[in-house]
Amino acid sequence: MPPVEPYGSGEPLVFDTSAWNRQRDPVVLARWLLTAESDLFAVCPVVALELLASAPDEEAFKDLDGTLAALPQASLSRSGGAAAIAASRDLRGERRIPAADYLIAAAAAERGAGVLHYDRHFDPLCRAFGIESVWIASPGEID
């Protein structure tokens, strides 16, 4: 078995909710942990909001909030928002892409990062932003 390497090309990665929710899958766990230990992850406020909204109780919310707050942030500026809108014009011919995904990709681009995901929407988005699109596992490999 080949040695495990961090996700991506060595550049920072903003993880999407689709990746975060699969981090404990045995297929991806070792690479996820190595990527985290290599300090390659950043979190976007849109992803943080999505994750925090699913916290089952106040204690889980506080724990998750603390974990996410400790990570480098991929904030979204006004120009990042404008870039997301421009990308939505450029990608009108694509299947419907959720607004949140545009904002996540824009925040990653502003940080000079790629996006780690398990979501087909990010391939055209990352191409539009000129950033790395990294699947946490091959499409269909995990649930």
Image: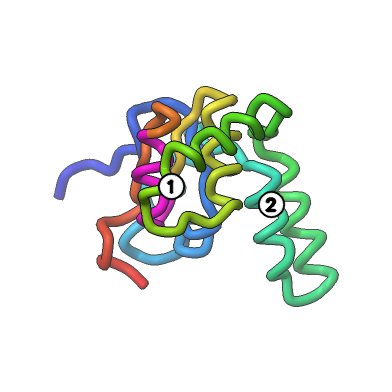
Disc 2 residue type (three-letter): Ala
Residue 92 numbered mark, or none: 1
In front of the other: 91 or 20? 91
In front of the other: 109 or 11? 109
Q: Residue furthest right?
A: 58
Disc 1 residue type (three-letter): Arg
Q: Is residue 66 magenta?
A: no
Residue 69 percent across, percent down from the top left: 75, 43
SS class, disc 1: loop
Looking at the picture, does residue 126 appear above or below residue 67? above
Question: Is any part of residue 74 visible from this angle?
Answer: yes
Residue located at (43% from left, 26% from top): 11
Question: Is any part of residue 39 visible from this angle?
Answer: no
In front of the other: 54 or 60? 54
Task: Give the residue at mark 2.
Answer: 48
Q: Is residue 125 magenta?
A: yes
Residue 2 percent across, percent down from the top left: 16, 44
Q: Is 8 on the left-hand or right-hand side of 111?
A: left
Rate crowding at label 1 as few (under 14), some (14 to 19) or many (20 or more) other CA atoms within 10 Å.
few
Residue 115 percent across, percent down from the top left: 46, 40
Instruction: Say how the picture is coloured.
Output: rainbow
